[in-house]
Amino acid sequence: MSVENPEFGLLREFPEPVCLMNLEGAILDANEAFVSRLPETGADIRGCNIYELLASTLQSPEIATKRRAMVQQVLLTGRHISFDNEKDGIHWRYLVHPVRSAEGQITRLLVIVHDITKTKAEELQSRKDNLVFKALMDATPGSVIILDAAGRISGINRYAMEVFGKSESELYACDPFEIVHPEDRHVVREKFRAILERDIEETVEAKICVHGNPEQARWFIIHARKTEIDGEPFVVTVGLDIDERKQMEQALKRSRDRLDFTLEKSHLGWWEFNPVTNSTRRTLEHDRIFGYDAFLPEWSFSLFVDHIIDDDRAMVKNLCHQAMEKQEDFAFECRIRRNDGQIRWIWVAGGFQFDARANHYLMSGLVRDISKRKQQEERQEELQLELQQAQKMEAIGQLAGGIAHDFNNALTAILGNAELLAKKVPPASRFIEHIDDIRKSALRSASMTRQLLAFARKEIVTPKVCPIDQEIEHLLPMIESLIGSHIRFLWRPASGGRCVHMDPSQIDQILINLCVNARDAITDNGTITIETAPIIIKGGESTPGHPCRIPGEYVRIAVCDTGCGIDTRALPHIYEPFYTTKEPGKGTGLGLSTVYGILKQNKGWIDCVTEPGEGATFIVHLPAFGDDGAVIRSDEPDKTIISTSSATILLVENSPDILSILQGVLEEKGFSVLAAQSAGTAVRVASQHPAAIDLLVTDIMMPEMNGIDLSEKLEAARPGLKTLFMSGYAQETFYQPKNLYKKANFIQKPFNINSFLGMVSKMLASPRS
């Protein structure tokens, strides 16, 4: 039989059944996949009628007749048709396409059979998934709405229909944004556009009109995100009813507003800090105290610490750290630098909230600007300092000035000569011991001079971390000289290395005033004892009657005497200014009031235990600072390695004795020394010296020109010239008013030769400025 479609060979390897038939249903050609579906006919079915084959194979003439009728539709309409059939669990889809001749007439029919079993299964699964999705949406305890890119509703759950009071068809037809309350509608629209344009998630709180009535609006929190379905963008929204929560929040806000108003009118700022999340909550008054007119979004605990001035920062950190470790409340006063640059005093009090495991907590408390109160206290302190200054004898003031300077110069010469003499005397000489006694006496005199300068100096209080036992030990020689030889003096240190945070000169003033009062209470022979010890005051102990009103760790200093004691009638008045039990001319009544003021300034306490005729014990409690930060003071000779050199040094000293000694020791070490006894001579020597001068060593106090001006004048002519300053005055005398030189290039008289040579070596080794 001839093949009417010679091109059918292209379809023979087609994986799905394909056949070509004429208009009456006779098979013109078919591929193997098609033949295998009709096994009873054999391999060659060309010429067989497809309808007859179907009738015999399926044993159903009715099916064959229906298929013929379907094919007739192709002939009538000229368009292809498709129909599905299922057999033995396999779904087939038949496609019947008309094949036209060159003249456009339908001459043949092409039948293609597809296995759509998998597609049918996927469609079934899709229907099941849709049902599950719908069930999940309806089970969601919130409104679920799916919007297309145009803002039309594409999906909605039963909860939303119940809330909005509309049927599904009504909701699909309405504008979903009209459901939102008019006050929030604009915001919700903007969020919707942002989600589509920027592909982000958004959350917004808005009022939703229940049953379309704005008067019955309820608060919802709406979470929305963009998704794609079949390549098309959609926005999925889930709304949860938070109306009760919003009402509670509003009630809480009203309560907080009333509290904030009360705190603001009381000028109190409330704050809360979460160290775990590093987040804070505050009232506006809190931020105003720190100089901000509005809330500062980036406020944190570290920013609070940054506002504290440098001098108070370590103290605040230490107090907070101790409170956190002990889980105790805290309170302190410190200075801050406001945002506008003002220095203000604040009072801070608070505590910690711990969970059951004590590992998650909150810090909360109050803050208040106490600058006005502090100004009043500072004024009182100024008046007290003026009274205290008037109490000092004129001789001590003079000694703290020019006499102290000359005395230190003399001690420098004594020390220098003693050391030079010690080098020239054989080690086995019996004079070595006497020379060493001279050196020790000079050092002891220098220590007393320094203590006297510290006591008499009128300066700004500079708190430092001070080991209390070490500070008192440096004061002992001066105390012994004040109380006299007829009184036995006992020193019993037992603080265990405890430190306090206060000005060392204030410690000196406390002890000197207490020891002088103890001395005056002893008429003949007696004993004065100073004892130290650490002490912890617990909350239950700080009751009325106890000297310490605030619990905490303290250093206890007791000054005991065996004198006459204090009358019980006078005891309540002993800290009042100008109140004294001494005879006229023997006291001003300012000693104990000075002690009392210093202790109050440093948050300390004082108590007196006494009986008439049984002596008195003054007990001072100073807040312990902690174990960190040690102050090292030493009068021992410097152990710095001293190197010899051929450097040129211009030495300027108006004391010929000191000039001779220093010139000798420098030249002995190999230095080339240009010596001058005055500033004018030094300028002339420097101008006539053609070579370089490596170091200027000059006294500060000289008649013609002081050493600081001399250094500036020579440095202008010789840029980069290094200078080592010397003086019998304390360095702060020159350093505080003008920032003319650093502490690294100053040596105070009296000094030993090794210290001096070590300083010279250090200056020569340092880079030029």
Image: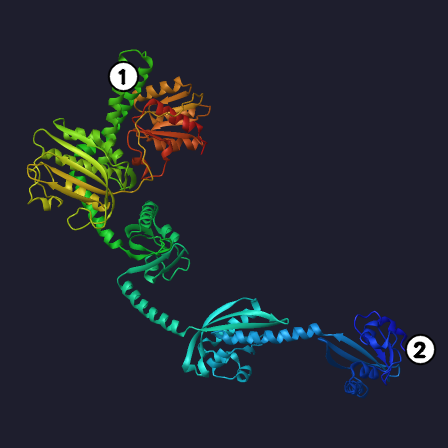
For the residue marked with disc 1, what is the amino acid?
Ile
Is residue 136 visible in this depiction of the protein?
yes
**Residue 740 position in % (x across, y down):** 36, 37
- Closer to the eye: label 1 or 2: 2
The chosen color scheme is rainbow
**Residue 18 position in % (x across, y down):** 82, 75
**Residue 214 position in % (x across, y down):** 43, 81
**First in residue order: circle 1 vs circle 2:** 2
Q: Quadrant of the C terminus?
A: top left
Give the side of residue 280 with respect to residue 510, left or right.
Answer: right
Give the side of residue 303 with respect to residue 224, left or right.
Answer: left
Residue annotated with mark 1: 435
**Residue 696 position in % (x across, y down):** 39, 27
Name the element at disc 2: loop
In this orientation, which residue lies closer to the viewer: 569 or 135? 135
Residue annotated with mark 2: 2
In this orientation, which residue lies closer to the viewer: 7 or 2? 2
Q: Quadrant of the N terminus?
A: bottom right
Name the element at disc 1: helix
For the residue marked with disc 2, what is the amino acid?
Ser
In this orientation, which residue lies closer to the viewer: 750 or 315? 315
Q: How many marks?
A: 2
Q: Which mark is residue 46?
A: none
Quadrant position of residue 428: top left
In this orientation, which residue lies closer to the viewer: 173 or 16? 16
Give the side of residue 94 with respect to residue 238, left or right.
Answer: right
Quadrant position of residue 726: top left
